[in-house]
Amino acid sequence: GQQVMQIPQYQHVQEGEDFTTYCNSSTTLSNIQWYKQRPGGHPVFLIQLVKSGEVKKQKRLTFQFGEAKKNSSLHITATQTTDVGTYFCAGRRSSASKIIFGSGTRLSIRP
Amino acid sequence: DTEVTQTPKHLVMGMTNKKSLKCEQHMGHRAMYWYKQKAKKPPELMFVYSYEKLSINESVPSRFSPECPNSSLLNLHLHALQPEDSALYLCASSQDHWQTSTDTQYFGPGTRLTVL
């Protein structure tokens, strides 16, 4: 069945350093979404990518969808303590299939 | 209003109890979801309701029984649960499940369930 893996599982960075999480699917995706879950909180939608090779930016966050639509990345420039949390990607093969969440990357930050 | 509400926030129940989790949204979304999330794991899809009809059941045990009384409400009835069912139960909604352009999910705060 469809699997969505994320690496790394954990990342501990110094405040101000950059952070990247990678999402890889075993099958081609029709879209990919990114969610952030703060400790003790619930997933909050960040962005959706649909087109092959698409790149979107939100302030310090840059999201990318691979050319083959099988992988995606989230890059945070100059991390801040407010970036702490777990970042999940989520994708689906087609409109007829269910959304699959990636395994998540947990980001912690040294102030 | 982009809020999904869930009640109760916390629930402790015995294995012989019957309880219900409730979820509500007023965004006019026609798809609603139940997820189960264990600590340090991603949300795991349980059920999808689309236009008030059950569209997806991810082989969930019958001790979990979903109900969608109307387009704004989603319930999850619990009966004879096991301790391993203890988890955070998240409700989500999206505009439409069957179009990838409108399947962005808005999650509620969750119900933290403990089964003794």
Image (tube, coloured by chain):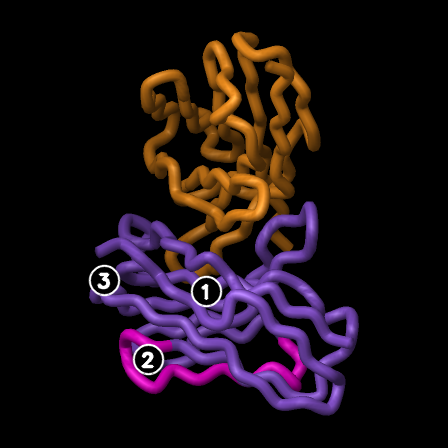
Chain colours: A orange, B purple
Q: Quadrant of residue B89?
A: bottom right
- The quarter of the rendered structure image containing the C terminus of chain B is bottom right
Q: Is mark 1 on a helix, strand or loop?
A: strand
- Which residue is painted at 58% across and 54% down in the image? B43
Above or below for B72 versus A31: below
In terms of depth relative to the viewer, which is nearer, B109 or B75? B109
Q: Residues within 10 Å of mark 3 (few under 14, many from 20)?
A: some
Quarter of the picture containing the N terminus of chain B is: bottom left
Q: Is residue B4 left or right of residue B10?
A: left
Height in image: A34 above or below B43? above
- Pinpoint the chain carrying mark 3: B
Q: What residue type is labelled 3?
A: Met
**Earlier along the polypeptide chain: callout 1 or callout 2?**
2
Marks 1, 2 in one chain: yes
Which residue is more in the foreground, A11 or A96?
A: A11
Dot 2 or dot 3: first in sequence order is 3
Q: Nearer the viewer, residue B8 or B57?
A: B8
Q: Earlier in the sequence, mark 1 or mark 3?
A: 3
- Residue B2 visible from this viewpoint: yes
Distance between the alpha carbons at the discs numbered 1 and 3: 14 Å
Residue A46 shown in magenta? no
Residue B70: where, in percent of width, then height? 29, 82
Which numbered disc covers residue B91? Answer: 1
Q: State the residue at coordinates (48%, 47%).
A: A43
Q: Mark 3 points at which residue?
A: B27
Q: What element carries label 2?
A: loop
